[in-house]
Amino acid sequence: MDSTGTESTLAKAAARIPRHVAIIMDGNGRWAQERGLPRFAGHKAGVETVRSVVEQCVMLKIEALTLFAFSSENWRRPATEVSLLMDLFMLALNREVKRLKRNNVRLRIIGDHGGFPPKLQAKILEAEQTTSECSGLTLQIAANYGGRWDLTQAARNIARQVAAGQLEPDAITEDTLSGNLSTKGLPDPDLFIRTGGEQRLSNFLLWQSAYAELYLTNVLWPDFTPAVFNRALQDFAGRQRRFGRTTEQVRQHSGNFSDD
């Protein structure tokens, strides 16, 4: 194969890597219960899996990884479990931020920060500022997050702009709404993974995932090894993403994912 052919092959391989991966990390509690452990042990094990997935994304030069850590509905869980999760969140931030910065990973925490204890809010701000200049992977942790909350906040921001005379109602587009979501500035997810066997979106990145490829697995989050992640990426690479076009159009249009 000549150099041109080699470059073409490499370009196709790179095109099959998703720019943005979103993951619902489900199954921590069940993983612990299957082993006769308290549910919190599963959450601690899940933190190790997060580290592994982040490292893999850095290696593959994936642009963004968004992890659903704590939904706005999770406050309904037993108070003791919620309190332990908040402690674990604080501990993870204390332990991981320096590692993230060394690996050029920018951290963003998306969701309603106001629902967290003041010390945790301060730690979130500090962690985001510490990694703000990093230019590699953007790691978004969705905490006290809900897709409907995200859309509501975006609508409020746009309404304020209209009320202030900064924006005409007829000038509002899909890009306007996207630019007011908590994920602004990042590409929408290409690959949406849910572990733990459930088959629902659970109010996660509802607008952003309109064209995401779904990968649902029965594997519980603490068992989501690099090999399992690779299977998801390989499955994604084999799909044809048409975005409303025909198969023939996709094949004729370079730069799009295809199955040829």
Image: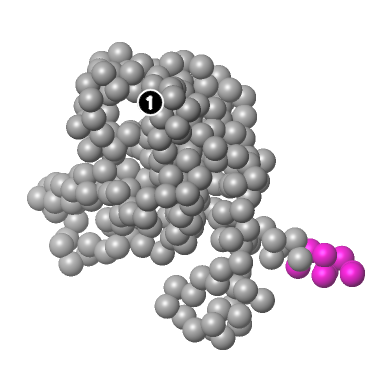
Q: Which image quarter is the N terminus in?
A: bottom right
Question: Which stretch appears magenta?
Answer: 1-8
Identify the image quadrant of residue 33.
top left
Q: Is any atom of residue 114 visible in this view?
A: no
Q: Is residue 206 above or below residue 260?
A: above
At 39% from the left and 22% from the top, the residue drawn is: 38
At 37% from the left and 55% from the top, the residue drawn is: 199
Q: Is residue 158 above or below residue 140?
A: below
Identify the image quadrant of residue 58.
top right
Magenta span includes 50: no
Disc 1 secondary structure class: helix
The majority secondary structure of the magenta stretch comes to helix
Looking at the image, which is closer to me, 72 or 150? Answer: 72
At 51% from the left and 17% from the top, the residue drawn is: 95
Q: In the current view of this chain or complex, which residue is farthest to the left?
A: 163
- Residue of label 1: 39
Q: Which image quarter is the C terminus in?
A: bottom right
Taking 217 as reference, is 136 left or right? right
Amino acid type at image mark 1: Arg
Looking at the image, which is closer to me, 167 or 255? Answer: 255
Looking at the image, which is closer to me, 32 or 16? Answer: 32
Identify the image quadrant of residue 141.
top left
